[in-house]
Image (cartoon, rainbow, N blue to C red):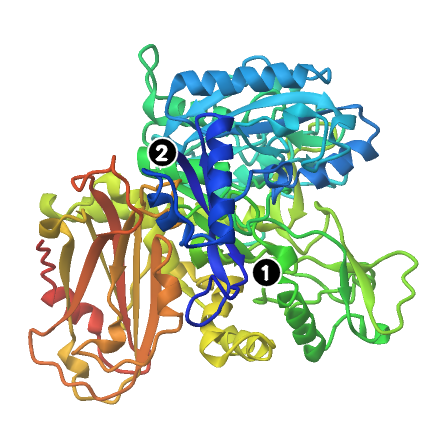
Amino acid sequence: MFFLKEQLEEFEPDEDFYKGDHKPYPGRVIASMVNKKSIDEIIRLWNIFDKDRDAPFDTGLAKFKDLFKKLNKVRHYTVEDRLLDTGLSSYLEEIREMGQDIVRFEVEFTYPESRERRDRAFDEFHRLIKEVGGNVIHGSRLELASIQYFACLADAPVSAFENITNQTNVRFLRASHVLYFRPPGQSSVSAESNETVELESEFQAEEPFGDPFVAVFDGLPLENHELLQGRLVVDDPDGFASKYVAGSRIHGTGVASTICHGDLNGERQSLVRPIYARPVMHYNGFDGEEFPQDRLLIDLLHSAFVRMVKGNHQEAPVAPRVKVVNSSLGDRFRPFRKEMSSWAKFLDWAAYEYNLLFIVSAGNFVSPIKFTIDPAEFRNPISEEGKKSFLDQMLRQDFNRKILSPAESINSLTVGALNKDMAEIDPSNPMFFARINVSADHGYLAPYSRFGWGMNGSVKPDILMPGGRALLRRAPADRGTDHVNLNFEQGGFTNPPGIRVASAGPEGQTNHVSYQFGTTFSAAQTTHLAGNLMEVLLQLNQESGPSQQIAESYFPVLVKALIAHGANLGENYSLFRDLIREFPSVENNQVKARTAAYTGYGEVNAPRVLYCTAHRVTLIGIGELTWHEQESAHIFKFPLPTSISSQVVQKTLVTTLAWFSPCNVWSNKYRIAHLYLSNFRNNEDLTLEDGMYDFRKTSRGTLQHQVYEGNRADAFIEGGFLIVKVNCRKDASDSELKFWKRIKYGLAVTLEIPDTVEVDIYEEIREAIRTQVRA
C-alpha cells in the first residue's frame, strides 16, 4: 500500500467514531495500491470489519483491524473525488457558454515511487482518452519529485464530461491513477476596459544601478515606457513579446511601475536598482493576457526560477542576486478551502530550495454584491453606519471570498488590500454621483480583498497594504426596495481614485498612466517596500564592522520579518472585534483568531519599518537552527533602558520571527520546521498584557508576529536585558530531511514609548547593546 497524502476535511462524528468533545473530525487519507485486486481485497476486509468488528481475519491480516479502528470509512476513489474543489465544473460551464466543442484541462496523477509505475499510469490514461477522440498535449508531461507532482495537459470533447459521476461510461474519467482533473492555470487579465491618460509632466528620477534584487513574474511590461526606461531587465526566452499587440501590455506594466515607484499619486521613492522582469503571460489575441495554454504553469515557473538564480551546465544564472519575487497573479478557479494547490506547494518548495521571498496577492473578489440598505441612503457620502454595515455584511460572506491559489503558500508573504491610495479627489465632481465609496475613505478593508485562513488555520493574508479605492455602482435596472445590487467597475480609469501606475496607451504610447485597484497593487507596493528595505540593509552593512554585517543570503527571511514587523490592526481593531463578536458561531475567546482571517496582522506602516526614533528602537537578528537538540535554540538579549525604570510609562513591545520551512506534501501537518518565540506575556522583565493576535494562530505558519502593551512601573537593573529565545522543532515528519538541514530565520524586536516621554531610549540602548547569540 502506498499512501499518497492526507487531506484536511471535516466529517461529523457518529456513535462508533468520535472524539471526546464530539466535534467534527478532520482528515482524509488517499492510498494507491499496486493493482485492482489489492484494492478489492482492502474493500472486502473493510466490509467484514464494518459488519462485525470482532470478526476474525486470516493469518497475516490482523494488523488491518488495528488500521480500520482508526478509520470512519473505506471506499473506492471516485470520479467525484477527482473533481472535488478543483473548479473544473465552473470551468466547463464557461467552455460550454463559449460554444467550444473541445476543452483543455490539467490531469494530475498519483505519484508512485517507481518510474515504471508512473509510465504505466500515463500510458493507460493516454490510451483511454483516445477512446473519446481526445489526446495528451505533446511535451506537457511533468514530474517534480520535490512536491510529488506528476501531471500533463489534455484535450477532450466537452461532451465527455456530461456525466461526471462514478456511473459514467467515459473510461478516462475513471482512470485508476488519476488524482485530479483541473482547469489549466487560469490567471487571465482583461485589457478591454483599460483607459489611460497622458503624463502631465516629464518624469525625473536617478538612473538605477547594480544587479536586480527584485523580480516580477507577470505579463510583459512596456519596457520603453517613460516611467520604466532603464529600470527593467526583461528576460523573454519564450518569445511572448511576439504575441502582444500595441496597447496590450497592461498588467505587467502596471505591476512593474508600482514595484519601481510605488503609488505615483504620492511622493516617489524609486528603487535604486533595476528589477528583473520575466513574462509568464502573453496576449491571448482578443481581450487580455493569460498563461500559455500549451504548457503546465508549474513547468514554466520551475524552468524560469532555475534560469534566474541557478542556471545549468550550459548557461549561468541570469539574475542570481534576486531575493524577492513579486507574484500578483492567482487562479480564479482555485479559492483555498481545504486542499493545498500544486502552485502553492511549488512556491513553498522554491522559497526554501532557492532562498526566495515570494510576495503574493490574496486575490480579488469582483462578483456582484447584494448590500442590504435603504436604496435612498446609497449615495455619497455614505453614512458611517452604512460603511460599518457594509463591512459587517462583507465579513459574513467569507466562504465566497477565500484567498486564491497560490496565496495559501506558507512560506510566501500574502498581501490583502486596504481601500486606500494617495490620490486626492473632489467628492463634488459629477463622476462620483453614481460611484459610491462604501468603505471608510482611508483604512477599511477593501471591498474586493479576499480572506483566509491558510493551511492548518495559519494567518492568511499575512498583511494588508493599500490596493486603491474601489467605487461601486448600482446594477443597471436595479429595483430593490430594501437592498442595492452592486457591481465593480473594471480598471483602469483616467481619473482618481486608485493606485496611479504606468500604462500602455491604446496605440502603444509610452507616456500614459491609469488609476487601478486590486490586491495586484497591494502586493506590488509591498515588493516596492522590500526593495527599499534591502538597500537599508546594505547601508547598515557599510556602517558595521565585518562581524556585524548581514550576509545577503539572510535578506529574504529578514525582509519578510521586517515588513510584517510594521503591521498593526491599529484603531480598526476594535471595529473588527465588535463586528465579529456578534457572529452567531463565534465565542468570545475566538474573536482574536477570527479577526486575523480577515485582516492578517493588519496594515503595514512603512516608516516604522524603515526608521528608528528617539522613542522607538528596533533590533534585528539572524541565524540558522535545526531541530537537533544541540542546535535548536538561539538566545538574544535586548538591553532594557534604565531611564524608564520604575516609571508608569506606556510601553509597546513588537516581536516578529520569519523563516522558510521545507514541507512534506504527504502530511496534514505539511510544515516541517516550526520556529517560534515564547509568549512575552509571561516574561520576567516587562509586565505586558495579552498580545493583539491569537498566539496559537500566529504559530501555525512561517511568520510569527505579536504586539504587546503594558504601562506598569517595571524596575530594571542597570545592564538588564529582555531575553528573546528563538526555538526550532520538527513539525511534519520527513525521513529524507535529516536534522542537519539548517533553517535560516530573521528576527525583529521593537520597544516603543510615547513621544511625550522626555528620554532618548534609542541612544541609551545603542550604547548598551551587545547582542549575543549562543546555541
Q: Nearer the viewer, residue 494 or 404?
A: 404
Q: Position of residue 87 (x, y in %)?
A: 65, 41
Residue where numbered disc 2 is placed? 322
Give the quarter of the image for residue 331.
top right
728 horizontally vs 87: left or right: left
Is the residue marked by circle 2 packed among few (<14), some (14-19), or many (20+) residues within 10 Å? many
Q: Amino acid at mark 2?
A: Val
- Residue 394 against residue 252 in the figure, above or below: below
Residue where numbered disc 1 is placed? 420
Q: Secondary structure at mark 2?
A: loop
Q: Nearer the viewer, residue 679 or 247?
A: 679
- Residue at figure coordinates x 9%, y 61% from the top left: 770
- Residue at figure coordinates x 78%, y 67% from the top left: 428
Q: Position of residue 53 (x, y in %)?
A: 44, 54
- Residue at figure coordinates x 37%, y 36% from the top left: 349
Q: Position of residue 46 (x, y in %)?
A: 48, 45
User: Quadrant where the N terminus lies?
Assistant: top left
- Residue 602 against residue 266 in the figure, above or below: below
Q: Amino acid at mark 1?
A: Lys
Q: Secondary structure at mark 1?
A: loop
- Residue 46 against residue 463 in the figure, above or below: above
